[in-house]
Amino acid sequence: MPSFLRILTAALALTGLIAQPAAAQDSTLTRLARQHLYPLQASGSSFSGPGWDRLLTDVRQSQFVLVGEYHGLAQIPVFVAAVAREFKPAVYVGELDPYVAQKVTELAAQPGEPTAYLRQYPSALCFASMAEEYGLLRQLRAQGTRLIGIDQVFAASAGPLYAQLARLVKRRAARTYLQHQAARYQAQDQLNQQQHNQYYALTKQTPGSIDSLLTLTKAESPAAQQLAQAYATSYHIYTGRGGNHQHRLDLMKRNLLGELQPYQTATGLQTPPMLLKFGGVHLGRGVSPIRFGEFYDVGNLVQNLADVQHKKSLHVLVLGRQGYKLATLNPTNTEKLSVPYTEADYDDELPIKAFANQACGPAWSMFDLRPLRDALTEGKLLVPNQSLQRTIMGYDYLVVIPETTASHAM
């Protein structure tokens, strides 16, 4: 598997927590974490308690609310939906590509779950293929929230996107070719899913087929050219060598800035309330906690956008301590739809052992990281782990769910 696909797999799962030996935990860190812990009671889709009250106070004072997550946990979309009911965002930005966001916007206006679409294109809605995630997006649409996706084209989207291109082109020969390729790639992806292969038709295309796609659409409408270019750019991110993660981040930030053009006025940027939800490595301010380089991610850009408008961005990280998670979006791989995890299974991009040890439940635990950030800045707190230090500097709150269940694939 190419190195970027390994990175992508890790990012989709948001591997992130490492259990360090207790002796290595800084006592000041543990003490400060305990001092700034606020219980948060979860009851179905409702939340209460000192943690919830404290969080909502900050939410109501913010222009941007960013929720970094561990993907595949059923409780997190329910939590974000509760935040959205209070925050009432005009715009939601998700870790989806623009075309998935458009399709979800269309499907969410219809009654019921999008089972017919997912039978035709299994997994093609990316994270929105999860029942809880789709429920969140449907609620947001019902609230009148605009759904935006800024990520690269999802790897399972070759079939539906070629079919969409076929509907956009005017020339009959181009339409016939694209329809043929759409059916071919979708058949490949369905076979890969049945055989539990860890790749998609998009990532197995040849460079020549991508060149042909761009040539074919060169004389077509701007919408067709834009879709073909987005597909080609994503292909190169998936299959390239070196710098792929940075290219993906650059693409997401460009896409976000492009989506905000309607809010640029003669007196400057005037964005409405915005809610963002991505994997936890993406939404902190400052340097990302991701281990293999120095990256400034979407969360840092949003912090800058808040600054230029004299507004506030609130960065919240939500993780599970243990339980079950959804390990794959492949609906045919039933043995991996719900798998157990603990801290010991996690990587070290978001190390939270000092916090998770105190999250024993049944209440959720919400830690206010801002006093710890102040202590770090003032030199009163020593955190040798660079990823943990970046997490404390990047997020305002850390919410730890003591026991989670896996999201359900539709």
Image (cartoon, rainbow, N blue to C red):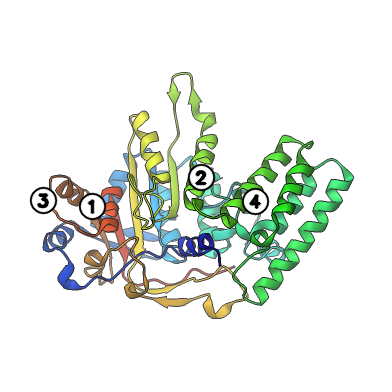
**Residue lying at the far front of the rendered structure:** 241
Write the residue at 36% across / 67% down. 347
Crowd class of label 4 (few under 14; some 14 to 19; many from 20; radius 10 Å): few
Q: Secondary structure at mark 3?
A: loop
- Would you say residue 104 is visible in this rendering? no
Which picture quadrant has residue 73? bottom left
| Disc 2/disc 1 C-alpha distance (Å) | 27 Å
| Disc 1/disc 3 C-alpha distance (Å) | 14 Å
Q: Identify the residue under disc 2.
A: 252
Between residue 364 and residue 173, name the one nearer to us: 173
Q: Identify the residue under disc 1.
A: 369
Sequence-first tag of 2 and 3: 2
**For the image shown, how many numbered marks are present on the structure?**
4
Q: Estimate the x, y position of residue 257 in percent, counting from the top left.
A: 50, 36
Sequence-first tag of 1 and 3: 1
| Disc 1/disc 4 C-alpha distance (Å) | 37 Å
Between residue 365 and residue 141, name the one nearer to us: 365
Crowd class of label 1 (few under 14; some 14 to 19; many from 20; radius 10 Å): many
Q: Identify the residue under disc 4.
A: 103
Q: Estimate the x, y position of residue 107 in percent, counting from the top left.
A: 65, 53
Between residue 253 and residue 274, name the one nearer to us: 253
Q: Identify the residue under disc 3.
A: 380
- Would you say residue 247 is visible in this rendering? yes
Pointers 2 and 3 in contact (CB under 8 A)? no
State which quarter of the image contains the N terminus: bottom right
Q: Estimate the x, y position of residue 375 in percent, counting from the top left.
A: 14, 49
Lateral position of residue 363 relative to residue 156, left or right: left
